[in-house]
Amino acid sequence: MVKITDVAAHAGVSPSTVSYALSGKRPISQETRLRIEQSIRELGYRPHAGARSLASSRARVLALVLPLRKGMHLPVVMQFATSVVTAARDYDHDVLLLTQSEGEEGLVRVSGSAMADAFVIMDVELNDRRLPLLRTLDQPSVLIGYPADPTGLTCVDLDFQQAAEACVDHLAALGHRRVALIGSHPEVYVRETGFARRVATGFTAAADRHGLLSSIHPCVDTPVAARTLAERLVREQPDLTGVVVHNEPIVHPLIDALTALGLRIPQDISVAAICPDEIAEPAATPITSVSIPTAQVGARAVDLLMSKLQGHEVPETTILPTHLIPRATTAPPPAATATL
């Protein structure tokens, strides 16, 4: 087993200098640090985690606070979690996953026990009750999502309002005059989860800007609920020709339900979705979509958090731009097609 003395001999420095390079406890020259890092790589040295933690007064662990609640689509949630874990490993940090809906109590418990150096917070609500505490903790935090008031916090997310606007803009440009948003599980709106509220806001704003008739329909995330809603929309809004879906589990069931009702996609009704590419691209009819870049969001959250741990200033809010990819599920509505 390679020891710290072996690294010191290989790099031509004292063992204490190697220790300082690992812990950051004392400054050393850039030239010496690079030489030590090269020796560590060549020899395959792995610092003892406990000793390194004691030397640096850090656990080298990030806490990912991810309460698993109704209305959350687990596959997409785990994409975010995986991206955080992968990015943390690039910084030689591990991740402690907290999944209970214990709010401030869980944060206080982890903070007080020094189990983690910092927090990544998910499932952020507009008026999240954890925010006052996060502003006072010794450990820094980054939110994936952003609340109504981000003052004193660090937030990163996709621009969900712009995502909804892009879908409506696309449908309006094709000539659609009535559109509907099939939104998240009703409880997601009750909790005032930020991304769902911003999608609804963007959808309505864009529809009003284009003079479109519009409606919003929260939907339970089951195939049965998707089928029931499709039947109701066809019955109550026979002139509906454009649908935006922001509810990952029912994207495919909703398309199947509309097809079963005799509607051709996209000839009779167009469908655009806000979802990961893994849902939109492999579909039998590839779905026009605004992608949710889970990998980029998670990696950016960790980058911001590590910068804060190093004492650097970071922006309060980082919003990733959206990009709509037209695919096979959107086209001009029947009336527009007939006039071409």
Image: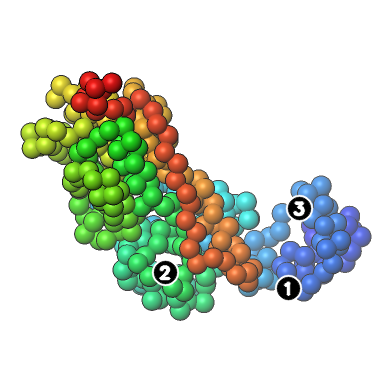
- Residues 136 and 284: in front is 284
Question: Residue at image x 42%, y 44%?
Answer: 292
Q: Which residue is mark 2?
A: 150
- Nearer the camera: disc 2 or disc 3: 2
Element class at badge 3: loop
- Residues 162 and 177: in front is 177
Element class at badge 2: loop
Q: Which residue is mark 1?
A: 25
Asked if marks 2 and 3 touch (Cβ < 8 Å), the reply is no
Mark toward the start of the polypeptide (3 vs 1) = 1
Element class at badge 1: loop
Q: Position of residue 173 (x, y in %)?
A: 33, 36
Mark toward the start of the polypeptide (2 vs 1) = 1
Q: Quadrant of residue 27?
A: bottom right
Residue type at numbered disc 3:
Tyr
- Nearer the camera: disc 3 or disc 1: 1
Mark toward the start of the polypeptide (2 vs 3) = 3
Q: Would residue 39 be found to the left or right of residue 165 on screen?
A: right
Q: Quadrant of the C terminus?
A: top left
Q: Position of residue 30 (x, y in %)?
A: 83, 63
Q: Position of residue 12 (x, y in %)?
A: 92, 60
Q: Which residue is mark 3?
A: 45
Residue type at numbered disc 1:
Lys
Q: Quadrant of residue 172?
A: top left
Question: Residue at image x 45%, y 79%?
Answer: 136
